[in-house]
Amino acid sequence: MTISQNGAFVRQPLIAGNWKMNMDHVQGITLVQKLAWTLKDHEHDYDRAEVAVFPPFTDIRGVQTLTLGDKLDIVYGAQDLSAQDSGAYTGEISGQFLKKLGCTYVLVGHSERREYHNETNQVIAAKLAAAYRHELTPMLCVGEGLEVRKAGEHVAFTLEQLAQSLEGVTAEQAANLVIAYEPVWAIGTGEVAGPADAQEMCAAIRGALAERFGAEIAEKTQLLYGGSVKAANAASIMRERDVDGVLVGGASLDAEEFANIVRFEHHLVTD
Ligand SMILES: O=C[C@H](O)COP(=O)(O)O
């Protein structure tokens, strides 16, 4: 998190909650309502961060109605999209449907998609292209597994994943891109990467973006860390220069806990 001389953030902090396959459409509405109420109580603490949730597809319409109706300062996105726009692709969801439902973001290449649905970097590149066709901001997920980390090859591995996933993305498109570094060994395990680990990788990613798209775009791109983030560890990770936010799984299902992550500035002052 880089702060300029006048105290403003150089890049807006982004706190994102990926609900994964949790919360039906009724529970989803309740969770967003609770989150909105909790955040309202601490308005002064979070008004500088963007808050995004990624509900299951079946919840998105309800979240749209709620956020529009109550004018909530919470944006939302989908957890995946099809590489295709329309047609005989049973079970797939088009980016154009997501755009019509008011989605701002879409997750692309989450490690659970890579692992359980065999999504390769090539598939992910095609999904990024689809996101751009429908004016969604992709949140591209990258990160290494435990074996790669143990072998000390995590930076090279993740940058290669990044390069292949970004195949075909233009500099103009890259101006509208969020990247989440999520080491697979830290997802849902309680094992959290240390702030220095998160910084090392985010700095390497920013360097790779600068080489590919130019320094100006690289400096503007929000880079998030994900993997067992909780209120107790979020602030110390976000304090790092190149970490601009967090992508939270399990802890985003608890409105109080997630709201406390959003209040990271409060923790920056007090911890
Ligand atoms: O998308 C979120 C990540 O997979 C992190 O999940 P987690 O916070 O439950 O470890």
Image (cartoon, grey):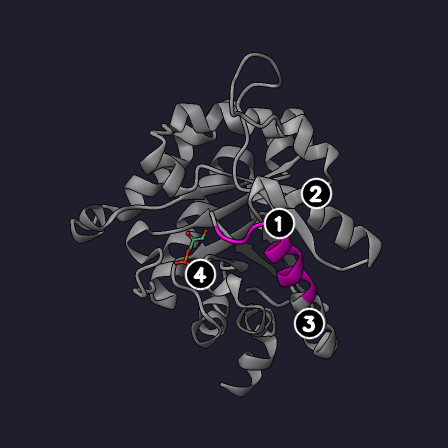
Callout 1: few (<14), some (14-19), or many (20+) C-alpha neighbours within 10 Å? some
Expressed as whole percent of the image width and height from the top left, the position of residue 116 reads 33, 36
Expressed as whole percent of the image width and height from the top left, the position of residue 57 reads 58, 40
**Mark 1 vs mark 3, CA separation in Å:** 21 Å
Residue linked to disc 3: 39
Q: Is residue 43 left or right of residue 247?
A: right
Q: Earlier in the sequence, mark 1 or mark 3?
A: 1
Q: Are marks 1 and 4 in contact (CB under 8 Å)?
A: no
Q: Are marks 1 and 2 in contact (CB under 8 Å)?
A: yes
Residue lying at 67% horizontally and 71% vertically, measured from the top left:
5
Mark 1 C-beta closer than 8 Å to ligand 1? no
Residue nearest the viewer, comparing 160 with 133: 133
Residue linked to disc 2: 61
Using the image, tell me which numbered label, if any, was put on residue 206.
none
Q: Quadrant of ligand 1?
A: bottom left
Question: Three-letter amino acid code at disc 2?
Answer: Arg
Residue 120 position by quadrant? top left
Residue linked to disc 1: 25
Q: Element type at marker 4?
A: helix
Using the image, tell me which numbered label, if any, was put on residue 250.
4
Q: Is residue 29 magenta?
A: yes
Q: Earlier in the sequence, mark 1 or mark 2?
A: 1
Question: Three-letter amino acid code at disc 3?
Answer: Leu
Q: Earlier in the sequence, mark 1 or mark 4?
A: 1
On the question of residue 100 being in view, the answer is yes
Mark 4 C-beta closer than 8 Å to ligand 1? yes
